[in-house]
Image: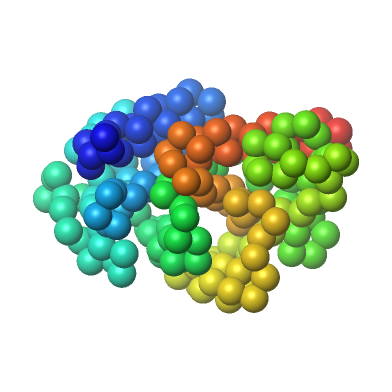
């Protein structure tokens, strides 16, 4: 049975693994996952991801109201608005992960316009693409210091055209993925990062 405690435990485990891989160094990145009641836990702002504990989160209502904070000083991630956009746009999403890797930033140099062509590798099945020699692109968004501006761009674009894969890139920033469970979101981060490494190596 999924509980708010197990949700946070999953997020802590992923954060620690991503830190070890160099994708969540320092306080970079943010992870969230829904609870059975529709609220969601998100990493608190300014927390070192390699030393994250189950106290380092904030529970929010879908519209953003803080419902619970294990530590009084906890504030929601500065990129909460992106997670809210994903959950609003894709009701099936139960987890949303955003990491900062070197490769995710480098591949934005290979973008044509507002998308990145993904290589037709077997691994792309991990993003839900079950086609022979698929021609798939990953949506790319401009980076802004004003994060709600990024979130609004995501809402505007995806409201008109649904992405081919459950992932997006923010230029010179990082990748965001979502899934129907924390496990699926974790796996999709790994798949996306594998594809980025391939593109950079091929480059």
Q: x, y percentage for residue 155? A: 54, 71
Which residue is depicted at the point 87% across and 41% down? 133
Can residue 161 be seen by looking at this rendering?
Answer: yes
Position of residue 148 measured from the top left corner of the image (x, y, whole percent): 45, 70
- Is residue 168 shown above or below 181? below
Q: Residue furthest front?
A: 1
In the image, farthest residue toward the left: 72
**Which residue occupies 41% across, 33% down?**
15
Q: Quadrant of residue 190?
A: top right
Q: Residue 128's x, y, as percent?
A: 66, 43
Q: Is residue 16 left or right of residue 173?
A: left
Instruction: Name the side, left or right, on which 86 lies relative to 122.
Output: left
Q: For the C terminus, which image quadrant?
A: top right
Q: What percent of the width, then of the height, locates residue 130?
A: 75, 41
Q: Please give the count of numbered marks on the rendered protein.
A: 0
Q: Which quadrant: the N terminus?
A: top left
* Vertical placement of residue 31 versus 13, above or below: below
Task: Decide if residue 77 is on the left or right side of residue 93.
Answer: left
Color style of the picture:
rainbow
Q: Is residue 174 visible?
A: no
Residue plotted at (67% across, 70% down): 161
Q: Is residue 115 above or below residue 161?
A: above
| Nearest to the observer: residue 142 or residue 17 | 17
């Amino acid at each position: 049975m999924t509980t708010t405690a197990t949700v946070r435990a999953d997020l802590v485990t992923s954060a620690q693994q991503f830190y070890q891989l160099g994708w969540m160094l320092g306080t970079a990145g943010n992870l969230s996952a829904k609870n059975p009641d529709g609220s969601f836990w998100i990493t608190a702002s300014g927390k070192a991801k390699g030393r994250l504990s189950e106290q380092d989160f904030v529970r929010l209502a879908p519209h953003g109201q803080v419902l619970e904070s294990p530590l009084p000083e906890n504030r929601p991630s500065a990129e909460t608005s992106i997670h809210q956009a994903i959950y609003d746009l894709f009701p099936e999403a139960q987890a949303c992960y955003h990491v900062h890797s070197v490769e995710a930033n480098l591949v934005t140099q290979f973008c044509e316009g507002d998308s990145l062509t993904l290589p037709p590798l077997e691994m792309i099945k991990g993003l839900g693409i079950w086609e022979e020699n698929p021609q798939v692109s990953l949506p790319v968004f401009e980076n802004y210091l004003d994060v709600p501006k990024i979130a609004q761009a995501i809402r505007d674009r995806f409201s008109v055209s649904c992405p081919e894969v459950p992932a997006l890139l923010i230029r010179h920033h990082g990748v965001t993925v979502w899934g129907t469970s924390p496990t699926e979101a974790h796996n999709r981060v790994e798949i996306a990062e594998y594809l980025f490494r391939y593109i950079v190596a091929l480059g």
